[in-house]
Image (spheres, coloured by chain):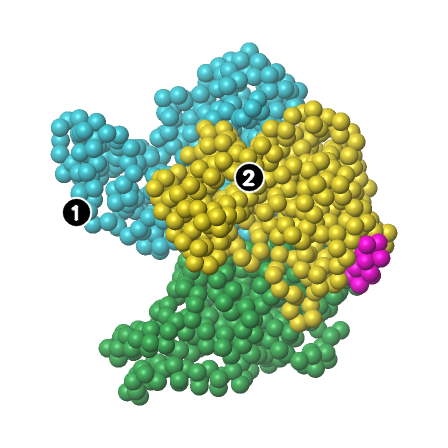
Chain colours: A yellow, B cyan, C green
Amino acid sequence: MSTDVESALAESGLDSVPLLDHHCHGVTTDDLDRESFETYISESDWPAPDGATHFDSQVGMAIRRYCAPVLGLPSFATPEEYLERRRELGGVEASERLLRATGISDLVIEVGHRSDEILDPGGMAAAAAARAFEVVRLEQLAEQLLEELVRRGGGSDSFRDEFARTLDERLRRAIGVKSIAAYRIGLDFAPERPGDDDVDEAVRAWADRIARGGPSRLEDATIIRHLLWAAVDRACAIQFHIGYGDSDVDLHRCDPLLLTEFLRLSRASGARVLLLHCYPFHREAGYLAQVFPHVYFDVGLAINYTGSRSDAVIAETLELAPFHKILFSTDAFGVAELYYLGAILFRRGLARALDAFARQDDWPAPEMRRIVESIAFRNARRVYRLGDELFEPELGGGA
Amino acid sequence: MSTDVESALAESGLDSVPLLDHHCHGVTTDDLDRESFETYISESDWPAPDGATHFDSQVGMAIRRYCAPVLGLPSFATPEEYLERRRELGGVEASERLLRATGISDLVIEVGHRSDEILDPGGMAAAAAARAFEVVRLEQLAEQLLEELVRRGGGSDSFRDEFARTLDERLRRAIGVKSIAAYRIGLDFAPERPGDDDVDEAVRAWADRIARGGPSRLEDATIIRHLLWAAVDRACAIQFHIGYGDSDVDLHRCDPLLLTEFLRLSRASGARVLLLHCYPFHREAGYLAQVFPHVYFDVGLAINYTGSRSDAVIAETLELAPFHKILFSTDAFGVAELYYLGAILFRRGLARALDAFARQDDWPAPEMRRIVESIAFRNARRVYRLGDELFEPELGGGA
Amino acid sequence: MSTDVESALAESGLDSVPLLDHHCHGVTTDDLDRESFETYISESDWPAPDGATHFDSQVGMAIRRYCAPVLGLPSFATPEEYLERRRELGGVEASERLLRATGISDLVIEVGHRSDEILDPGGMAAAAAARAFEVVRLEQLAEQLLEELVRRGGGSDSFRDEFARTLDERLRRAIGVKSIAAYRIGLDFAPERPGDDDVDEAVRAWADRIARGGPSRLEDATIIRHLLWAAVDRACAIQFHIGYGDSDVDLHRCDPLLLTEFLRLSRASGARVLLLHCYPFHREAGYLAQVFPHVYFDVGLAINYTGSRSDAVIAETLELAPFHKILFSTDAFGVAELYYLGAILFRRGLARALDAFARQDDWPAPEMRRIVESIAFRNARRVYRLGDELFEPELGGGA
């Protein structure tokens, strides 16, 4: 990076502030061949067409530019050189190097997605030399529970009670929940709490389907709404998938504005709503974060995937939202490269934006450092009710 | 500001051009405590959470940076110092200083919102040393009229006639109307003129509700469409709430594109349609302003609220829209700070954008000055049919 | 342009790379008076209001800045001087000068729009000294066919067969098809293939309407879906109107995300889907281009129309989309000025974006040149199955 950036990073404290990654997933430490690696560096479910490559993208350029040196290669090593070196080091060593270079002190890991192929929170904590916390995916919890109830021959009548009990149990350890309502029913769902009878009826239909050998995948809006309101009743931190994702999502049904009425109804509940990786709806998310006291958001995933353009994306998140409502996340999944890029591009993009404000509007350095700490870890700490004592030791250390 | 900006302001004439604020509201001159002041510097209806503050935002930083010196404080005085100084000067003196420093020569004030707590147009004219014009809120006019008809025991049969008479009377003085259809029914309303019988029936139901002690709040789409078409028939300047607002709005139903068919139907009527504060749909608004000859827009409100990022927002408004279709507004409400920021950030943002065009595409200074005058006051003057004689004396004076 | 830009253009190869304009239309070589010329330099169907002019816009400034010198005038000649000079040279000479200065080597021309007033592909090839290829508008092909069937007294029963035959015939020469479903039914159409019986029934109703003297304009969703699936079955390159257009479009129904399910269903067909001129939904298009292997997009039309702001628009297209999925187009129609601006602003905007990446992230020059060639012509060549031999001679020549 240029000396300008270096100095902006230092001035704002972003070169060394510890990061609390409030939404991320495990990585694999397997040795990866080219094909496997490429599937992890795109949200596409298919290979690039016609002999093209997923490396031919912002994230691909950023891996070659910034990850290659972490593995001991010159910048802009070819994809072949990069993957050869990665295999030479081994997946474990390469992943640890990249994870530990992020300066992330705390990981809030969602465990509901393809958990068989990636490290669990304990494994991630060890690999990254960071603390790890867990977030539970509501839809998966419900699916596992109902499968079990059906397997035990139990009626679906007990589902609501059992779900409440299971959720309470999981929340003894997990610090929040996540919903993928965006994927399953779209965010334009009916916002109010569903009636118990309606839930029971929907669960019966779902249980019957499973009992007949049908898929356990939960796609019923009434049941998903019940799960969400169960979380609201527990005054949880509730993460929502918003915006950018893979080809299974209908992105136009992931605009966070579709949640407006749900946000009104849940405002006074004590629950906090975390709008995840909101690109390209980050301005809409900023509006919600301003007007609703319990709404927070981040623009993760888009940071690592937009690479050289992530500075512009990050700057756009600093418009309507109060600074105490913006969070950091990588939404990294599968390969440690996405963690490293998510972290360094966030540090740089936020430093650049603040530097621009300082140059044109004379923002004082202590104010910038305060804002940096808020976004880097303090806001998330407050939202997830993580006590200060957990974090202080890290301050001034980290990256 | 830097010398670069100073020179761009001078080069384009933006340092001294008088501004016609085509959409704004009154301010309070009360002495405000911290809690009251904070409610005015956010579109949220609630305090910031957990000991956070609405000052911790772009608008808060901009107040400390730019308003503090107007009140005789150093830049970046703390919120406490700022509010203490404000009380020391008194709400009247502080407001006058801020208003008079804007260089706004003309205020087009919408009087329909919380008018009991703020100055009326006459009071604003005096405080700002500016001319003030009035715009009537259609929905409020209808609500007041029907309440009165019901109180007088009158049937609702006369509503359409009485509304026409009342609107004509108000338009003897007011220079346009405003609709908050976005808030009440969403902009996805049926665009065509409703039938008289349908209107009468809807009015009867509404009057019955009021007679039974129900709320007078107008939320009926048929009636609101009738009000809009009454304005179209009078070839009015019709302001529409678009985009960004408080938590009572469903922002996804405030996309100006939802008005497309209404714009087609009203195109040849002689009415002009003013799309207000279009963020984050300002690019969509720019498209409408290009293709429909009677459509104009502004990006007020977002200018004061995005502070250090307002330059980028303003630049985005200068894409598809012809320069004769862009207007200036602050949409300030409640505190004079929002006027001051709206004005100086507009001057600076437009100067910077034009300066960038000049640097990369050699735009000549006289062209820039012409465009500046168009956006600053000439377009609005034409739209609202305000004769040149009203304004010429101010030219060259102002800020 | 500044020396910075000159050097970025040279460094990236954008000063001389030949362009394949994958979506454009014919121009008129008539001598144009002011009124006629103005209708071509706006997407509005009406004159500017109140003595204003369509020249008072980004595209107007860009014409005066960049096209004037091509016609031998100083930059920022007045509109009057410009049009006088244009008439002096004659429409043929002026058009040829502008077209030949673009450095466009290949034109992919859609022939379905107002073809009586503009040059056909052969005429364009001659005027621009470029190769020209043809793309067929599906809806027009169907309209012409059914008109003919009705005229011949033929039943509508043969429509599906005849359409298949006609399309096959046209595709012997044309390199792809275009759909204006966005205009006629909105992109929120039912994505699956319609049943033959449903198609036949809809065709009968349409034929009856024509037989009774009604308009032949095709607005039936079932039939349009049949046309699209006919193209999918032929593994065509299928262009879709997306985003920005004239006042006949409902822009909120032109969001490419509305095509998501259609893209899922057509993914493995061999068809390639080209999302045309996606502003202001270019970020949404970039997402689709990342996740679906057969999706490509461009941001034409908005480049010439946003003038001095086109650099920012182009930069926004370089976020999620892989570089092998981005195409160049002008979408020029009617006057050669739109070709010239589309080409030079594209060259400059892409050069600036890449230069920014190089400055902040050290992108090596050979990588930039590779990406430039991809976007400038190689991606389109691959999508439209145009063999390399067609193009190589041009490389190094061009602009």
Of C229 and B203, which appears nearest the observer?
C229
| Residue indicated by mark 1 | B197
Residue at horizontal 64 percent and vertical 54 percent from the top: C319
- Is A68 one of the magenta-colored residues? no
Q: Residues within 10 Å of mark 1 (few under 14, many from 20)?
A: few
Q: Residue furthest front?
A: A153
Examine the rendered structure and indicate whether residue B79 appears above or below residue A237.
Answer: above
Residue at horizontal 35 percent and vertical 69 percent from the top: C220
| Residue indicated by mark 2 | A177
Position of A276 with respect to B241 (left or right) is right
Residue C184 in percent (x, y) is at: 39, 66
Q: CA distance from mark 2 to mark 1?
A: 52 Å
Residue at horizontal 42 percent and vertical 51 percent from the top: A207
Q: Amino acid at mark 2?
A: Val
Q: Amino acid at mark 1?
A: Asp
Is disc 2 in contact with disc 1, using a CB cutoff of under 8 Å?
A: no
Position of A307 with respect to C224 (left or right) is right
> Can residue A5 be seen?
no
Q: Residues within 10 Å of mark 2 (few under 14, many from 20)?
A: many
On residue B84, the disc is none
Q: Provide the residue span drawn in magenta.
A: A79-90
Residue B384 in percent (x, y) is at: 38, 41
Looking at the rendered structure, the secondary structure element under dot 2 is: strand
